Amino acid sequence: MAYKSPVYHVIPVPIEKVRPNTYNPNAVAPPEMRLLYESIRADGYTMPIVCYYAKSQDIYVIVDGFHRYRVMLEHPDIYEREGGVLPVSVIDKPLDQRMASTIRHNRARGSHDVDLMSNIVKELHELGRSDAWIAKHLGMDKDELLRLKQITGLTALFKDVKFGQAWQPMDEEDGDESENGDDALLG
């Protein structure tokens, strides 16, 4: 059987059974939220909310579409018109893959919150994912990943990083003329 994308199996889910995830770094400014509301008001929901179904709790955890979810929560006219039901497309992936999916969706659309993004890098690291895995699945280069790891301030994120020597102090006979060696830093 050929692969069939989740979008071909959109299901109606009562908003009460949908929950935001705890890791989404995407932020939408008020003008864009108003525009999203106007878009949904004028055109309806044209894209499903991407969720993971947590069977044990019988809830749908958002992977992508948090702001479309918020529109229904915050606007009674949308809730009423839609009958309190959201279009949901379900993916069945472990947490690390869902986090990566969220980031890919966000990055494909625009910007997201750097502090929250660095927290995701931290969480993925704590889940045992390597820098190479994180960079590949979140669409980052090694410099961007390094900057995000630095923001967290956690030394554990750097335990496997190989550091070179940026400079080597010069001996006095190598031409260091200062008594305290400060000039050696300038090379």
Image (spheres, helix red, strand yellow):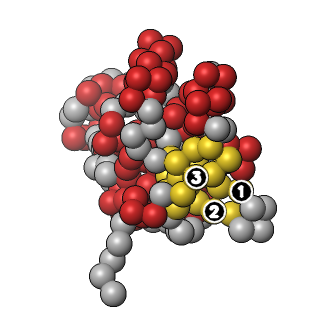
- Amino acid on which the number 2 mark rests in the picture: Tyr
Residue 53 is tagged as 2
User: Residue drawn at (63%, 51%), measured in percent from left and top?
Assistant: 13
Residue 98 is left or right of residue 79, and the answer is left
Q: Are marks 2 and 1 in contact (CB under 8 Å)?
A: yes
Q: Residue furthest top?
A: 31
User: Residue drawn at (26%, 27%), measured in percent from left and top?
Assistant: 186
Q: Earlier in the sequence, mark 1 or mark 3?
A: 3
- Amino acid on which the number 1 mark rests in the picture: Ile
Residue 96 is left or right of residue 14, and the answer is left
What is the C-alpha distance between the residues marked 2 and 1?
Answer: 6 Å
Q: Position of residue 86 (x, y in %)?
A: 57, 44
Tag 3's secondary structure?
strand
Taking 121 as reference, is 8 above or below it? Answer: below
- Amino acid on which the number 3 mark rests in the picture: Pro
Residue highlighted by disc 3: 12
What is the C-alpha distance between the residues marked 1 and 3?
Answer: 13 Å
Q: 45 or 90: which is nearer to us?
A: 45
What is the C-alpha distance between the residues marked 3 and 2?
Answer: 13 Å
Q: Are marks 3 and 2 in contact (CB under 8 Å)?
A: no
Q: Position of residue 146 (x, y in %)?
A: 40, 45
Q: 75 or 128: which is nearer to us?
A: 75
Residue highlighted by disc 1: 59
Q: Earlier in the sequence, mark 2 or mark 1?
A: 2
Tag 2's secondary structure?
strand
Q: Position of residue 140 (x, y in %)?
A: 32, 49
Q: Quadrant of the N terminus?
A: bottom left
User: Residue drawn at (33%, 60%), measured in percent from left and top?
Assistant: 136
Q: Earlier in the sequence, mark 3 or mark 2?
A: 3
